[in-house]
Image (cartoon, rainbow, N blue to C red):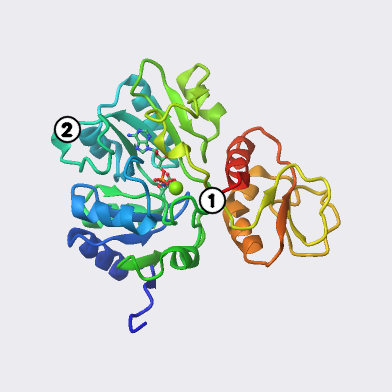
Amino acid sequence: MGRAMPVLPATDETIARAAAALAAGQIVAFPTETVYGLGANARDSSAVAKVFAAKERPRFNPLIVHVPDIATAETLAVLGTEARALASAFWPGPLTIVAPKRPESGISDLVTAGLDTIAVRVPGHPVAQSLLQTSGLPIAAPSANRSGRISPTEAAHVEAELGDIPALILDGGPCARGLESTVVSVAGTRPVLLRLGAVPRKEIEAVLGRPIALAEEDAPVASPGQLERHYAPQTPLRLDAATVEPGEALLAFGPDAPECEGPAINLSATGDLAEAATKLFAALRTLDESGARGIAAMPVPDEGLGEAINDRLRRAAKAG
Ligand code: TXA
Ligand code: MG
């Protein structure tokens, strides 16, 4: 509508434009290895407010602050022994650490929803890294979808969700991991898993040297973002399907997919969970748009990355 398409291939030049837009208080979408983020300067409350407005996200749900390295993370959060062990094992990468916030860091209270903790992450994606280094800003960025909807793993998904609301959308191709970061809180007496994600629980436990529990769903302060129905297609999703009913689309997994006359996507014909994670959100989006009256989802083993895949499928299947 009179505006240029906001999707631009990520190059040094477009990354510099995105950095300038952030410095000027605008919001931009960019790729990470997990999903696309919708970023704002985390010290600029009015820019951060634009992110909440664009997503229609409730203000009680805090944002993750992205930084280029551990040293910068330490200027925003107080990282103890276990936090540092996790950071050096998984950063840069798909882990988010929730730790006590340093009030002097100047991060907007809107980012942290008034909590005395902050979520920090060092992304590994080269475009995200370059944007962080070029801008020199801490970037508050939730997934670049409308609140409650399917997270975007391609630039075109961001455009479908948000249109020309972001000043620009940096296109870095499809996200390699396809699931959001694993969120671990080290703010309490013992580490707690706030969100299952791209780093499997077992890998976190191996670094901590002890089991880590998943936060209670009914502990809103511990895990504010996990309350809602989420990752939700408009088409009803049926879990643990062994067969496909007439009019349904199929979300398959593994070599033994049932017969399906309608649209069908196999997350991994070989039963590879990493491949399935990468394809999950794009597949949900495609099947949602297929016109099928329902989506039948085959079971996925609840181990390794399968735990996070099943978490997303369960939330997507909750009636709206
Ligand atoms: O992979 C990801 O983490 C992506 C990319 C863009 O980095 N971001 C992402 O952000 O998934 P978002 O906003 O969709 O999810 C952030 C999660 C929410 O569940 C939120 O409640 C939680 O992190 N969170 C953020 N700050 C928190 C805090 N201080 N205490 C507890 N939970 C927090
Ligand atoms: Mg999200």
Is 197 placed left or right of 258 in the picture? Answer: left
Q: Nearer the viewer, mark 1 or mark 2?
A: 2
Q: Is residue 232 above or below residue 185?
A: below
Residue 130 visible in the current orientation: no
Tell me where residue 20 appears, x and y as whole percent: 21, 64
Q: Are marks 1 and 2 in contact (CB under 8 Å)?
A: no
Tell me where residue 141 appears, x and y as whole percent: 34, 50
- C-alpha separation, residue under disc 1 versus residue under disc 2: 33 Å
Which of the 4 image quadrants contains residue 15? bottom left
Locate the N terminus by quadrant: bottom left
Tell me where residue 259 appears, x and y as whole percent: 86, 57
Tell me where residue 89 appears, x and y as whole percent: 43, 31
Which of the 4 image quadrants contains residue 94? top left
Is 317 placed left or right of 119 in the picture? Answer: right
What mark, if any, has residue 29 been given in the picture? none
Q: Amino acid at mark 1?
A: Gly
Residue in view at x 50 percent, y 55 percent: 175
| Farthest front residue in view | 320
Residue in view at x 44 percent, y 56 percent: 146
Residue 54 visible in the current orientation: yes
Q: Which residue is mark 2?
A: 103
Q: Which residue is mark 1?
A: 178
Q: Amino acid at mark 2?
A: Pro
Is 303 placed left or right of 110 in the picture? Answer: right
Which one is nearer the viewer's eye here, 280 or 115?
115
Which one is nearer the viewer's eye here, 46 or 11?
46
